Image (cartoon, helix red, strand yellow):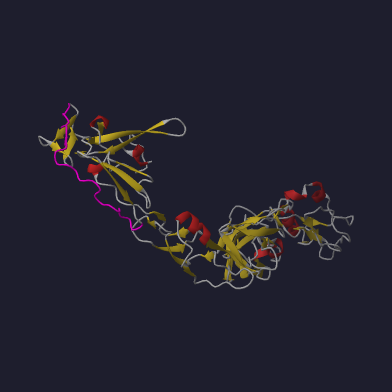
């Protein structure tokens, strides 16, 4: 890797690294090794040092002045080359050269002109036989800045644990009176260092509560969603900690999605009796799953409650599986029903509970001697009397007259049980039956259903009533439900364009 900056006189090299692991343990501090070479303005290349950096130390800030000034001639560093980079999990993400504002680079050159050398420790020209000035005390700096510079001539300021530099930190020098420069104490220490924060933790099928934030050293307690349980360490509340490298520690466990069989029993009308469940996941200990709670991918076989059938077939057997989101997948059961009585009987019967199992329908059969017949819907889904009434052949309905809007095709005489076809006179229109429903809010809901025939019933009335029929423009089925609100389908008959 090579970084080239031909326009500046660089004094610092800043290298940032990152790990391909999202979460590391405290003992898992990844390192990276590499060698640094410098390319100078005369195109000469000099090897510097071999360095080792930890992920927690990013960005790595290297003072280049000791390398620049150790050669006979002061030359501008034009580029930096990183080579022999080795690491199992770390990678170099960026590299840049920077100028230190507090350093007078022309004074460095002046040292050479005066046959003196530039001291990287003091930042000043020192005669070859000169005596260096030493500061005995630590510089006056404020938290989160820190130093370890007693009895030194130069001090590299650093950030305290849990903080990272916003830019290269000052390199301060011991003055001639044996004291450190004071400029650092006059600046806001937080303008140099910022607190390291971990990203907001994301827990699959759970959530993290971080009452003191997500900075270094802070802990977040973990709780699972209502449809999941925690599998792992049971002696304490599950938690994670923000480590020095800005990564979260490993959560010693995980949230496992579960399904509650009681929910399926109540919402799907299935029976507890003879229910058989199995799971490929075995959980032991205090959090052992019971007969009510089953983990993801569990399979349960059951039967519908009495007088119930599956909604998609006439079966009473149900197979459910616990889905990845903690919800049961599979069919539901609904009240078993008997088929609707023959259309010719319309208007002759009244039922106690519709066509559900157990409902009893009373028929007033037509004829010279009107008879009362009763038929019960059995648990088998069939009527106790399939044809309760014998329809006299002489029963006749009036043939409906065609209109400018509707056309009927009927035989000359329309006997009970016979039908007529109907269509709209205008092309592109359908015959529909109009029905009004009063909503609890007081509003009226209009519903339209397509009609192609009308029939003569044993009560000598036409069904549906021709007075309830009208013509409506045909829906464009290719455009229904395509995500666009098409004006030709934005009607009740077209179910408001499928919405």
- x, y percentage for residue 86? 58, 72
Answer yes or no: is residue 425 visible: no
Q: Quadrant of residue 400?
A: top left
Residue in the picture at 77% in, 47% down: 188
Query: Which region of the structure is painted magenta?
Result: 379-403
Judge left or right: residue 17 versus residue 107.
left
Q: Nearer the viewer, residue 30 or 375?
A: 375
Q: In the rendered view, would you say 17 is above or below 396?
A: below
Quadrant assignment for the C terminus: top left
Does residue 408 appear in this view? Answer: yes
Q: Position of residue 252 (x, y in %)?
A: 63, 68
Which secondary structure type mostly characterizes the magenta part of the structure? loop
Quarter of the image where the N terminus is located: bottom right
Q: Residue furthest top?
A: 404
From the top left corner, tell me how far across and down residue 62 is, in percent. Answer: 68, 62
Towards the viewer: 34 or 105: 34
State whether residue 281 is above or below residue 225.
below
Q: Residue furthest left?
A: 412
Whether residue 394 appears in magenta in the rendering, the answer is yes
């Amino acid at each position: 890797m090579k970084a080239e900056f031909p326009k500046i006189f660089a004094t610092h090299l800043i290298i940032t690294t990152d790990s391909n692991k999202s979460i590391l343990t405290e003992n898992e501090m990844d390192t990276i090794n590499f060698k640094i070479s410098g390319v100078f303005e005369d195109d000469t290349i000099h090897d510097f040092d071999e360095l080792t950096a930890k992920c927690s130390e990013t960005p790595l800030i290297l003072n280049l002045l000791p390398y620049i000034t150790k050669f006979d001639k002061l030359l501008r560093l034009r580029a930096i080359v990183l080579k022999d980079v080795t690491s199992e999990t770390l990678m170099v993400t960026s590299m840049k050269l920077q100028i230190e504002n507090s350093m007078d680079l022309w004074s460095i050159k002046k040292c050479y002109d005066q046959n003196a050398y530039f001291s990287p420790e003091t930042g000043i020209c020192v005669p070859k036989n000169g005596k260096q000035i030493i500061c005995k005390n630590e510089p006056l700096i404020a938290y989160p800045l820190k130093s370890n510079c007693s009895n030194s001539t130069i001090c590299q300021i650093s950030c305290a644990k849990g903080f990272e530099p916003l830019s290269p930190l000052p390199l301060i020098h011991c003055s001639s009176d044996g004291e450190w420069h004071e400029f650092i104490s006059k600046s806001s220490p937080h303008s140099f260092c910022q607190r390291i924060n971990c990203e907001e933790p994301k827990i699959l099928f759970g959530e993290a509560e971080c009452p003191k934030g997500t900075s270094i050293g802070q802990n977040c307690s973990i709780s699972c969603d209502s449809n999941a349980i925690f599998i792992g360490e049971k002696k304490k509340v599950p938690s994670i900690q923000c480590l020095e490298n800005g990564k979260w520690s490993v959560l010693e466990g995980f949230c496992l999605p579960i399904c509650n069989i009681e929910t399926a029993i109540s919402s799907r009308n299935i029976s507890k009796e003879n229910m058989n469940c199995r799971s490929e996941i075995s959980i032991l200990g205090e959090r052992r799953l019971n007969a009510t709670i089953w983990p993801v991918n569990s399979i349960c076989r059951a039967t519908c409650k009495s007088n119930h059938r599956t909604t998609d077939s006439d079966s009473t057997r149900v197979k459910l599986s616990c889905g990845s989101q903690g919800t049961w997948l599979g069919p539901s059961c609904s009240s078993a029903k008997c088929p609707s009585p023959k259309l010719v009987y319309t208007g002759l019967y009244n039922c106690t509970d519709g066509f559900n199992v157990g409902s009893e329908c009373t028929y007033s059969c037509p004829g010279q001697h009107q008879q009362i017949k009763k038929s019960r819907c059995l648990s088998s889904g069939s009527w106790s009397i399939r044809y309760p009434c014998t329809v006299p052949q002489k029963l006749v309905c009036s043939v409906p007259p065609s209109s400018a809007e509707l056309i009927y095709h009927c035989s000359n005489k329309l006997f009970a049980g016979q039908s007529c076809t109907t269509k709209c006179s205008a092309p592109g229109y359908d015959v529909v039956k109009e029905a009004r429903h009063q909503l609890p809010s007081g509003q009226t809901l209009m519903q339209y259903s397509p009609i192609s025939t009308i029939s003569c019933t044993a009560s000598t009335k036409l069904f549906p009533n021709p007075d309830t029929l009208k013509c409506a423009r045909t829906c464009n089925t290719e455009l229904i439900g395509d995500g666009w609100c098409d004006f030709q389908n934005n009607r009740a008959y077209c179910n408001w364009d499928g919405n």
